[in-house]
Image (cartoon, rainbow, N blue to C red):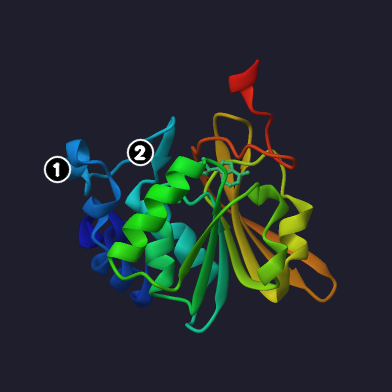
Amino acid sequence: MVEEQLRHRGIQDDRVLDAMGQVPRHLFVGEDLRDRAYEDCALPIGEGQTISQPYMVALMTELLELKGGETVLEVGTGSGYQSAVLSLLAAEVYTVERVSSLAEQARTTLKRNGFLNVHVRVSDGTLGLPDHAPYDGIIVTAGAPDIPRHLTDQLKIRGRLVIPVGDRHSQVLYQVTRTEGGIKQTVSTGCVFVPLIGKDGWEDETYH
Ligand code: SAM
């Protein structure tokens, strides 16, 4: 997976490649999908949600430009896999999930496998997690209609936000850096994520 799907496609940060090689992805999917855990695609994790494609996990992590010692917020815990990768690259990882059953499952998997610097919370991540702000990095693993203001406000100066922005079905990955004078944004690649649902995200269509 690391050689063919990541390094070969341009992921260069050795710390990211190393972390991706260390986290056993099969522990973060259901038993029925274990033999497909290292395939080059997203996989279902229940509740209509997915564990992201390994390449996208690596690319988004690389765009955070972590050096070690940072405090990071993830919005969209899902299976907990991305949080586990981040936990090897930063000092503390806070991760928020809106679906409580997924958060509970991720919390159990992370704890059981020793990823003890990950802290799982259930809340609307479009509002960030003010209790532990400001963050050196924020990563959003669901597609947003716009860049949520609460998230840029909770970044440190020179902190980075990595977020897919677009419509409900396809997005573009943005790397947003908070500077003294405002925010600076650069565009990475096209991507497809489940929608970010919440106050500063999309409306929940399940109730319509
Ligand atoms: N990072 C995850 C992993 O490694 O398995 C994949 C996340 S999945 C693509 C997106 C997740 O974002 C879903 O679990 C979904 O419930 C969650 N989500 C959507 N809107 C959210 C919100 N406003 N706050 C927190 N989580 C949200």
Q: Position of residue 146 (x, y in %)?
A: 72, 43
Decide if residue 26 is on the left or right side of residue 197: left
| Quarter of the figure that contains the C terminus | top right
Q: Where does label 2 land, which residue?
A: 45
Residue type at tag 1:
Asp
Q: Residue at x 23, y 60 (%)?
A: 24
Q: Which mark is residue 35?
A: 1
Q: Nearer the viewer, residue 155 or 65?
A: 155
Ligand 1 has an atom within 8 Å of the beta carbon of the residue at disc 2: yes
Count residues near mark 2 (Cα–Cα under 10 Å), then give few for <14, some for 14-19, many for 20+: some
Decide if residue 35 is on the left or right side of residue 79: left
Q: CA distance from mark 1 to mark 2?
A: 14 Å
Q: Position of residue 83 (x, y in %)?
A: 43, 61
In the picture as drawn, the residue positioned furthest to the top comes out as: 208
Q: Residue at x 25, y 41 (%)?
A: 30
Q: Position of residue 81 (x, y in %)?
A: 37, 56
| Quarter of the figure that contains the N terminus | bottom left
Mark 1 vs 2, N-terminal side: 1
Q: Residue at x 65, y 46 (%)?
A: 124
Decide if residue 184 is on the left or right side of residue 32: right
Q: Which mark is residue 57?
A: none
Q: Picture quarter containing residue 114? A: bottom left
